Image (cartoon, grey):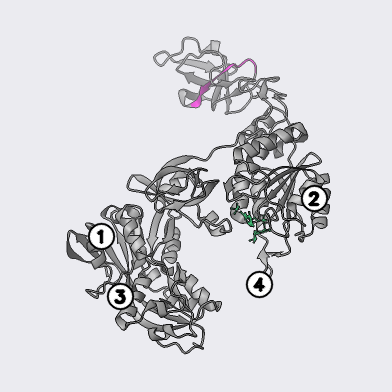
Amino acid sequence: MQRKIYLKKLDVSDALEKYKAELQQRGFFFDESEIIQTRKSARRVLAEAVYAKRNVPAYNSAAMDGIAVRSVDTAGASKVRPKILQKNQFEFINTGNPMKIPFDSVIMIENVHVIDEDHVQIFESIPPFHNVRLIGEDVCEQDMIFTRYHRLRPYDVALLLAAGVFEVKVLKKMKAIVIPTGGEVVQPEDEIDVGAIPETNSVMIKAYLEELDVDVNVNDVVPDSLDLISETILKAVESYDLIFLNAGSSAGSFDYSYHALEQLGKVVVHGLNVRPGKPTILGIIRNKPVICLPGYPGSCYVILENIVKPLINEKYRIITEKNLFLEASSLRRVVSSISEDEFIRVSLAKIKDRYVFVPLKRGAASMDALSKMSGTVVVQKGVELLDEGDKVTVGLNRSLEEIDKNILFVGSHDPLISIIADLLKQKDFSLNMSIVNAGSMGAVAAVAKNCAHIGGIHLFDPVSGEYNVPYLKRYLPQYILMKFVKRNQGLIVQKGNPKKIENLFDLTRKDIRFVNRQRAAGTRILLDYHLSKLGIDPSQINGYEDEEFTHINLALKIKKGMADVGLGIAFAAKIMDLDFIPLIWEDYDLLVLEEFFNDDRFQIIMDLILSKNFCNSDLIYQGYDLSSVGKIIRGENCDQISGNNNQ
Ligand SMILES: Nc1nc2c(c(=O)[nH]1)N[C@H]1C(S)=C(S)[C@@H](COP(=O)(O)OP(=O)(O)OC[C@H]3O[C@@H](n4cnc5c(N)ncnc54)[C@H](O)[C@@H]3O)O[C@H]1N2
Ligand code: MOO
């Protein structure tokens, strides 16, 4: 089978228009309807106008509790000249009760003096139909209540039922099938052997389509075989309105989706100028849309949002809502492809009075970036660079309220920060903390530029032998440092230390593969300092260039035998069940500026960190010392220690 290199790639909007035009010609957008019970019609779209079958209300009724009267009998009554009504001139009535002849008005009970069962005194003269809900006042029989293509909301359904409409003709709910393909995909609950991939896309696609009111079935995974894929598609087009193939869209030797679609029908689009999502195939077989979504989850999501959703909404006659937008500045530089629109998932926060965003993992395979995103930046085709600090438009994937309360933590990686984020939620569910691992120097820079609320730092100064403060003096005119934990840094090695590694000198051994931390990381600075102190040349270390961004990822590499040793914290060794050779105690502290220090959210974080819950929790594994936690160091041009805050 020949590899299929893309047809001419199209911009997303052009591709969508082209596809819609082809589908239009084949009758896809003709209305199909069904009659359903009104009770079950919420969210459905009406296929025809609906007329009231009865009046709402169905008869004249009291709008207030009080007495029903004939308005003429009240003539002349006033506060100064009250009038007495006798038996037969009034009747007690409650809200909603029908008005009986000859009564035509209601006086509220508060305004009536009841003398006895048969006599009341009134103080007002009222016109006919006063405090009366008139027959048909809300809706008149034969009134058109809704036009066609109205999407029914909960109160619309209530109105229809009140108006005697018990069945409605609505646009038929579409039925879709998702066909995952690929010999490597297995059920997520299965053991994942090397080469296997958990089949998660169909679950995401199904849930996504169901939110768009499509009924969805998921086919068994079809192995990489042109015949089997074709056979499954042919069967699917007989019973489903929409067919989604997943994966096999690109140019791999087992990517059969294109060939299947081409043989069975027409490929309208193959290849989009978008990243992720480039290899998407939009086809038509027997007048049914057959869409091949790329295998990577990030790509799949971009196509669901930008092609599938507008297509389904068009069929249901629903206007696709655009995300809210705001202007925000980038924390990092992003180099993008000049030939494609790139959808970058970002985390957003409001710092001082402006919004900032951090680009999340860029890879189309990243599911974590999808789950963490609070916004999307589109770097347009033709734009190659988004520089640090550049202000661009960000589409929101979360509410503005959530974004406004989001706390952006930038810093060196430490698992305790995630624990704080979780406890923060427990304290106040409206608070969220986005954690960005950018190393200690990255944290200082981000806080200094007002691009992060909190920085997490452990910066050793070789000259003074002190942690953090010397760096802050250098880079920040003003700062507040909250002492957090002392943590044990050391060599993380395989369980049982099979290579008998004892100290930093062993890193230069030929049989040792080292794994390092990224450049701006405090752990890296610490390593480089000790190497130079011991006269060890980094170029002698096999693996010095191999960088990981977190302690956990570093430990994982060792666990999986991709490296023998790395410098990291005890916690990471502990949770990965690896051995740990302690070397140094270091200070890991929290950096904030005055404004956020005074923010209620930081006060909550401080209370939480100082709480028994945190200090005594099992979560504090070995390797942490909390003896200085909570001490506040203020730096204001000249340094001063302002005291120990609640210890
Ligand atoms: N030589 C080229 N290789 C690739 C190209 C290219 O242009 N030339 N395009 C890349 C791009 S961009 C994307 S996106 C992917 C699209 O891949 P396919 O749609 O062909 O899918 P597969 O190769 O079969 O799988 C890719 C990847 O997707 C994940 N996957 C697949 N199915 C599922 C599922 N049901 N649930 C969860 N995840 C799934 C899995 O990680 C696969 O490894 O191709 C690039 N290659
Ligand atoms: O287009 Mo692919 O979807 O960049 O990853």
Instruction: For mark 2, give the secondary structure.
Output: helix
Q: Gap between marks 4 and 1, in whole Å?
A: 47 Å
**Where residue 167 sits: x, y (%)?**
75, 32
Q: Which residue is at a point 77% across and 59% down the rendered structure image? A: 222
Q: Is label 3 or label 2 in front? A: 2
The boundaries of the magenta stretch are 101-109
Q: Which residue is at a point 47% across and 47% down the rendered structure image? A: 384
Question: Are the residues flagged by discs 4 and 2 in contact, CB closer than 8 Å?
Answer: no
Instruction: For mark 4, give the secondary structure.
Output: loop
**Where residue 85 sits: x, y (%)?**
52, 16
Q: Which residue is mark 1?
A: 475
Of 53 and 542, the residue lying toward us: 542
Q: Gap between marks 3 and 2, in whole Å?
A: 65 Å
Q: Is label 4 or label 3 in front? A: 4
Q: Which residue is mark 3?
A: 627
Q: Is residue 263 left or right of residue 598?
A: right
Question: Are the residues flagged by discs 1 and 3 in contact, CB closer than 8 Å?
Answer: no
Q: Which residue is at a point 52% across and 74% down the rendered structure image? A: 556
Amino acid carrying label 3: it is: Ser
Q: Reading the chain from its start, which is encountered first: label 1 or label 2?
A: 2
**Can you see residue 337?**
yes
Q: Which residue is mark 4?
A: 194
Q: Gap between marks 4 and 2, in whole Å?
A: 29 Å
Q: Gap between marks 1 and 2, in whole Å?
A: 62 Å
Amino acid carrying label 2: it is: Ile
Q: Is residue 500 above or below residue 413?
A: below
Q: Residues within 10 Å of mark 1 (few under 14, many from 20)?
A: few
Q: Reading the chain from its start, which is encountered first: label 4 or label 1?
A: 4
Instruction: For mark 3, give the secondary structure.
Output: loop
